[in-house]
Image (spheres, helix red, strand yellow):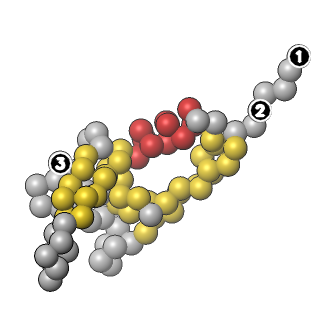
C-alpha cells in the first residue's frame, strides 16, 4: 500500500502519530511516475488496487500540495521481444 498523488511531484512528510512522541517519515509518490519507472524496469502494469482509509477514497494532510490515495499495484514481467 503506497500513498500516491496525481497532480504534483513526489514529496516527503514528517508524520506525528497522535498520542505518541515519535516522528515517521512518509514518502508520497506520483502515481504516473511510479508506473513509468516500473515499465522502464521491464514490468507491465496489470492492475491497481485502491485502499480505503478513514472510510473515504481520498485522504488529506495539512499543508500537503495535493490529496493522496493509498494504492497498490500488480505488475508482471513485460513480454520479451523474440528475435528475427
The percent position of residue 18, horizontal first and vertical second, equals 16, 79
Q: Is residue 25 left or right of residue 80?
A: left
Q: Residue furthest front?
A: 22
Q: Image height check: is 21 above or below 65?
A: below
Q: Is residue 61 left or right of residue 28?
A: left
- Name which residue lies at 63% across and 41% down: 43
Q: Nearer the viewer, residue 6 or 15?
A: 15
Residue, disc 3: 65
Q: Nearer the viewer, residue 70 or 18?
A: 18
- Name which residue lies at 49% across and 42% down: 35
Task: First in sequence, mark 3 or 2: give its number.
Answer: 3
Task: First in sequence, mark 1 or 3: give its number.
Answer: 3
**Picture quarter with the C terminus:** top right
Q: Residue furthest left?
A: 63
Tag on residue 80?
A: 2
Cα–Cα span, label 2 and label 1: 13 Å
Q: Image height check: is 21 above or below 62?
A: below
The percent position of residue 17, horizontal first and vertical second, equals 19, 74
The percent position of residue 25, horizontal first and vertical second, equals 25, 58
Q: Nearer the viewer, residue 73 or 23?
A: 23
Q: Is residue 40 left or right of residue 32?
A: right
Cα–Cα span, label 1 and label 3: 49 Å
Crowding near the residue tagged with mark 1, few <14, some 14–19, many ≥20 C-alpha atoms within 10 Å: few
Tag on residue 58?
A: none
Residue, disc 1: 84
- Name which residue lies at 18% across and 72% down: 22
Q: Nearer the viewer, residue 45 or 10?
A: 10
Amino acid at each position: 500500500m503506497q500513498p500516491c498523488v496525481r497532480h504534483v511531484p513526489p514529496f516527503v512528510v514528517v508524520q506525528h502519530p497522535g498520542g505518541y512522541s515519535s516522528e515517521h517519515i512518509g514518502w508520497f509518490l506520483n502515481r504516473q511516475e511510479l508506473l513509468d519507472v516500473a515499465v522502464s524496469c521491464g514490468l507491465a502494469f496489470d492492475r491497481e488496487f485502491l485502499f480505503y482509509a478513514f472510510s473515504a477514497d481520498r485522504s488529506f494532510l495539512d499543508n500537503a500540495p495535493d490529496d493522496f490515495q493509498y494504492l497498490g499495484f500488480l505488475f508482471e514481467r513485460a513480454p520479451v521481444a523474440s528475435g528475427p
